[in-house]
Image (tube, helix red, strand yellow):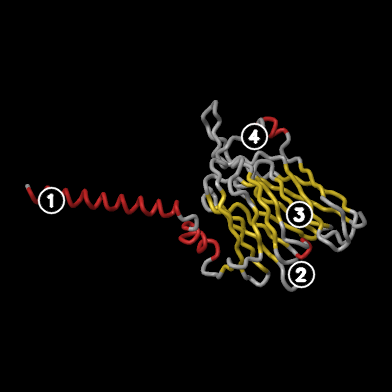
Amino acid sequence: MLKVQQRKSIYLLLILQLSLLSSSIVMAIEDDPDALWESSFKTHFFGDREIETKKPLVELKAPKRAANPALVPITIKSKIGQQPERYVKTIYLIIDKNPKPLAGKFSFTQESGQADLSMRIRINEYSKVRVIAELNDGSLSMASRFVKASGGCAAPVGSDIDKAMARLGKIKLFPRGENAPGEPLFTQFMVSHPNITGLQMDQLTRMYAPEHYVTKVDVSFNGKPVMSAETDISISENPSIGFYFVPSESGELKVMVKDSKGLTFTKVRKISAEN
C-alpha cells in the first residue's frame, strides 16, 4: 500500500514539474519578444542565412502603442537607392504573434527608384513587427519594432459590410508631390475592400465571416513592373499602400489587385513626365 502511495506521489510531482516547466516556457516566450523569431520564424523563412541587424539597410517606423490595432500605420524606408548594381529586391513584413505572421512580401525593380512603402496593418497582440530587406546579391538586413496592440485581426469591419461590398474593388490611384524627371515619385493607391480575416464574429448571428482579403497587387508603368505584393489578413481594411516609381517618360501607371475569391480589380492613370 505504501509503495502505491509513493508511486502516486512521484507521479503527481512529475506532473507538477512538467506543468511548471511548460508555464515557464510560455512565460519566457511572452517576456522575450524575440523568442518566436529565434526559435521558429527565422529558420522557417530564411534558413541559416545571415541577417544584418546592427546596421540595417532598411528602417521601420511604427507607433510604440497603437491607437487602433486594426489600423496601425507603418512606414518602411530603404537606405539605398535602386541602382543597377545594388538594389532592394524584396521586403518581407513579419508580425511575430499574428495568426499568419507573414503579412506581406513586396518585390521591387529598378523602376521603383526607391524601395519605400507605407501602409496600415493589423496587430493581434503585443508583438515585434519585422522588416527584412533582401538585396539583389542575396544579402539580408532587418529592422524591427515592438508594438503594443491587441485584437486587430478580430476587430469588426469598420464600415457597414453591405456598403463595403457595394464599393468592392474601387481603386484610387494618385501621385503625391511634383514630378522631377528621372527622380522617384511617391504614389499611393487605395482599394475598397473589407479584407475580412476569418476571425471576425458577427455579433448578431455569432458566426464568423469567411476570409475574403487582398492577396496580390501588381504595379506597372508602361508595361514594366514597378512593385508587386503578396499580402494576407494582416493588411488593414481598405488596403492603402504608398510606393515610389520613376516616371522617366509620359505613360500609364497601372495597378491590378486580386483577392482570395479570385476577383480582379484594375486602375490605370495617365502620368506626364513634365508635370
13 shown above or below 196: below
N-terminal label among 4 and 2: 2
N-terminal label among 2 and 1: 1
Q: Secondary structure at mark 3?
A: strand
N-terminal label among 3 and 4: 4
Work out how far the residue at label 3 is from the one at label 4, CA to CA, in angstroms. Answer: 27 Å
Pointer 1: what residue? Answer: 6
N-terminal label among 4 and 1: 1
- Residue 210, percent across and down? 57, 38
Q: Considering depth in this image, is 167 or 67 the residue closer to the camera?
A: 67
For the residue carrying disc 4, how many other residues have a C-alpha within 10 Å: few (<14), some (14-19), or many (20+)?
Answer: few
Residue at 75% x, 66% y is 81
- Residue 176, percent across and down? 82, 50
N-terminal label among 3 and 2: 2
**Any mark on residue 83, and which?**
2
Please tell me how many numbered marks the rendered image carries.
4
Pointer 4: what residue? Answer: 158
Pointer 3: what residue? Answer: 219
